[in-house]
Amino acid sequence: MLSLFAGAFLASQAFAINNGLARTPQMGWNNWNSLGCDVSQDLLLDTSRILLDSGLRDVGYQYVVLDDCWSDGRGKDGYIRSDLKKFPNGMKWVAKQLHDMGFLYGMYSSAGEMTCARYEGSLDHEDQDAETWASWDVDYLKYDNCYHRGRFGYPEISFNRYNKMAKALNSTGRPILYSLCSWGEDYVHTWGMSIANSWRVSGDIYDHFNRPDTLCSCDDPRDPHCVAPGAHCSVMNIINRVAPFVDRGQYGGWNDLDMLEVGQGGMTDEEYKAHFSMWAALKSPLLIGADLRKLSSTTLTILNNPAIIAVNQDPIGRSALRIFRDQEVKKDRYGQGEIQIWSGPLWPHDQLVVFLNAADEDLEMTTNLNDIFVHLGPEGSAPQTKLEFDIYDLWADRMEDFKAEQILQGNNQYKKDWYNSTETPYKVGLQQGDVRLLGKRVGSIGPQHDALRAKVPRHGVRMFRLRNLNEPAARYSSTKDEL
Ligand SMILES: *[C@@H]1O[C@H](CO)[C@@H](O)[C@H](O)[C@H]1NC(C)=O
Ligand SMILES: *[C@@H]1O[C@H](CO)[C@@H](O)[C@H](O)[C@H]1NC(C)=O
């Protein structure tokens, strides 16, 4: 069956970078989308406190990642210095505070002579900088692509530039998650997994669902000549760009669809749910980008849905694939509009189905077992089409707003309801059939009753887990170690 096959296949490829990290996509927070250069030690500590108190750390958001603008030149010895006005106690002290709260600490640089905001870059200083970060007890590096002195344009050139840092990080002896940010350039999805834990697939995201923007070039993902990925890329633009190579994500290395915009204010609630769901289904790292000091209860109830996060952190680690796309639907004033269906395996032998409605109206969408399993055998020949599945709606048990509001106000009464992945990792929760990871059973599907049908709101998703009734999870327990 697919899950066993996928497990065996991946076992042989696993940990190409071999630092033991990112066995599932990394989760955390990064300041860039909401705060840009406005960084300080207080920001990191305040944010960590909120992640902890709101329960977000314990649904999985573990990395607190500092983006650009933290440094203050290099000393005569060539070593990079942190800005003591923004970080008066120094970076090692910050790392200690974060570690004491149960977080991991992320740091930023660029594989160029300068960072994007024109601070010191690490090009040709790789060993010194890696050594510095390791000495500060840093656990993560986001490595950007600005001011690279023309060292790009062909995969091998970019590979060599980024591989220098991979080697430098490795030789520190400290496991440091390596997150490439080369904007999808030079076919990074064909080589990123051999040196890094994740690689960006596009220009920078912006806070819109599908609005095209001239700053986001490369609108046609099949255009091999596009070398300027740009910025202001919408959620739908990024999904369509990564669609042809979503399968490149695997244990230890993931397609990075960029940091989340959830909670930033530019999209509707349905659009943010769709954004978050698709990032989860496509096994992207989940880095919250909002300013958590202004976290709203509604935003919290998207980011803390354990049934969606369990899809992202699934032990099989395979992205959903696009099994259906229709562009002949109602378009908006920008000429945008389409619907898509995505599906993929979930541990132990469940199946994910996502209806994505990017048309300019609410629609009913439908699929069946033949279409869902078509890649395992055409026209209903896949064995799965003969099975019975329970259907679980993964958004049905979204936390009520008033509970989230209580949590944000420090009322601990609701803490007992939270899924705690620090205590019970997602794989264990799934093994135990924890209802918080399954959502709500809404029906079943099998050879006798053949359609999965749902109303999908405009710019929204419906996300379902199909649970195989014929093969209890226990049957697969002997394979759990290799997964
Ligand atoms: C460095 O690379 C080697 C060989 O791939 C690997 O065994 C080791 O775990 C790596 N160490 C770190 C700290 O990443
Ligand atoms: C989750 O579990 C850990 C480990 O037992 C505990 O320290 C933490 O307080 C728990 N988190 C919540 C939100 O209850």
Image: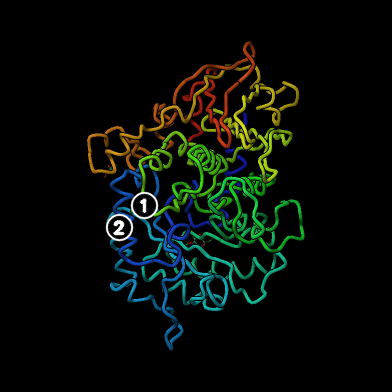
Q: Amino acid type of disc 2? A: Asp
| Relative depth, front residue between 220 and 415 | 220
The disc at residue 292 is 1
Q: Amino acid type of disc 1? A: Leu
Residue 167 appears at what percent x and percent y? 54, 68
Confirm whether residue 4 shows in the render.
no
Judged from this view, the residue extending furthest toward the top is: 448
In the displayed structure, 304 sits above or below 363; it is below
| Relative depth, front residue between 293 and 278 | 293
Mark 1 surroundings: few (<14), some (14-19) or many (≥20) residues within 10 A: many
Q: In this image, 387 relative to 219: left or right?
A: left
Q: Which residue is mark 2?
A: 46
Which residue shows up at 30% across the image and 57% down it?
A: 46
Which residue shows up at 46% across the image and 84% down it?
A: 78
Residue 301 appears at what percent x and percent y? 39, 38
Confirm whether residue 347 shows in the render.
yes
Residue 459 appears at what percent x and percent y? 58, 37
Judged from this view, the residue extending furthest toward the front is: 333
The disc at residue 7 is none
In the displayed structure, 356 sits above or below 166; it is above
Q: In this image, 218 relative to 105: left or right?
A: right
Look at the numbered discs 1 and 2 and tell me whether their residues touch, using CB distance below 8 Å: yes
Mark 2 surroundings: few (<14), some (14-19) or many (≥20) residues within 10 A: few
Residue 207 appears at what percent x and percent y? 53, 51
| Relative depth, front residue between 127 and 188 | 188
Q: Is label 2 in a helix, a strand or a loop? A: helix
Please tell me in which quadrant of the rendered image residue 10 appears: top right
Judged from this view, the residue extending furthest toward the bottom is: 76
Q: Is label 1 in a helix, a strand or a loop? A: helix
Q: Which of the marked residues, 1 or 2, is nearer the chain's N terminus?
A: 2
In the displayed structure, 127 sits above or below 227; it is below
Which quarter of the rendering shows the N terminus? top right
